[in-house]
Image (cartoon, coloured by chain):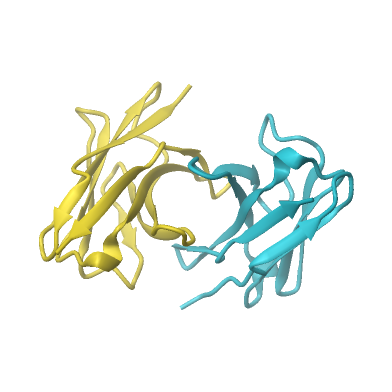
Chain colours: A yellow, B cyan
Amino acid sequence: QVQLQESGPGLVKASETLSLTCTVSGGSVSAYYWSWIRQPPGKGLEWIGYLYYSGDTNYNSYLKSRVTISVDTSKNQFSLKLSSVTAADTAVYYCAREDYNSRAFDIWGQGTMVTVSS
Amino acid sequence: SYELTQPPSVSVSPGQTASISCSGDKLRDKYTSWYQQTPGRSPVLVLYQDNRRPSGIPERFSGSSSGNTATLTISGTQTMDEADYYCQAWDSSTGVFGGGTKLTVL
């Protein structure tokens, strides 16, 4: 079955760019919508944005000026870049698949903790 | 921006029925999904399109939506159902989550 795995640095310095990759296994990234979602410690879920393999993207308006989500179909991966990070960006970052018919996130990665240090 | 509001906590006795609400403007016109998250784990989809269960989700999980409120109902609640629950909907192609409800079974 389809599995997602996040990867990237667990520690990022304030003002720098957070970069994460989600590898899709057991299926193709060239279908479905793919999202990034984060969860600050002890807090709730926040949707960051989605990408369709064709390149169509949409971002949370709150983060839009700092976020880029892109896809590499040759590697079956999609990526997140979040610039000018602050301590408020410290969170567990999840990648997830959106089933377009159900409009629900039906598959999630295990999540990766990213800490922003000053 | 669109907001979804959930009660921070709900308590239920084992074997009883738990109901968790999710409120948002004209939520009835959107599809609501529900996710269960236990400590240290990724969220798991338990309901989509207001009341449909993915394969493998027990029948005790059900949902409804009317007016501005969607409701997740767990019948015959078990101790294993103790978790955080999040509602989620789409507003103009933007994903929105509720703040989450901690369900305590005691």
Using the rendered image of the protein, determine whether residue A106 is visible from the camera's viewpoint. Answer: yes
The outermost residue toward the front is: B106
**Coordinates of residue B94 in the picture (x, y in percent):** 44, 64
Is residue B93 left or right of B60 when viewed as pictured? Answer: left
Of the pair B58 and A77, the residue shown nearer to us:
B58
Q: In the figure, is residue A35 to the left or right of A83?
A: right
The image quadrant where one finds the C terminus of chain A is bottom left
* Number of marks present in the image shown: 0
Where does residue B31 sit, x and y in percent of width and height? 63, 58
Vertical position of residue A62 compared to residue B88: above or below: below
Q: Position of residue B33 (x, y in %)?
A: 62, 53
Quadrant for residue A68, please give it. Answer: bottom left
Q: Is residue A38 above or below residue A66?
A: above
Q: Residue at x 21, y 67 (%)?
A: A86
Is residue B71 among what the camera can see? no
Question: Measuring 81% from the left and 55% from the top, which residue is drawn there?
Answer: B12
Residue B85 in the image: x percent, y percent? 63, 54
Give the camera-side residue of A118 and A69: A118
Q: Quadrant of residue B3?
A: bottom right
Identity of the residue drawn at 54% across and 50% down: A103
Residue B80 as seen in the image, left or right of residue B34 = right
Taking the spot 69% from the left edge, 29% from the top edge, the residue there is B56
Residue in front for this viewpoint, B18 or B57: B18
Q: Quadrant of residue A57?
A: bottom left
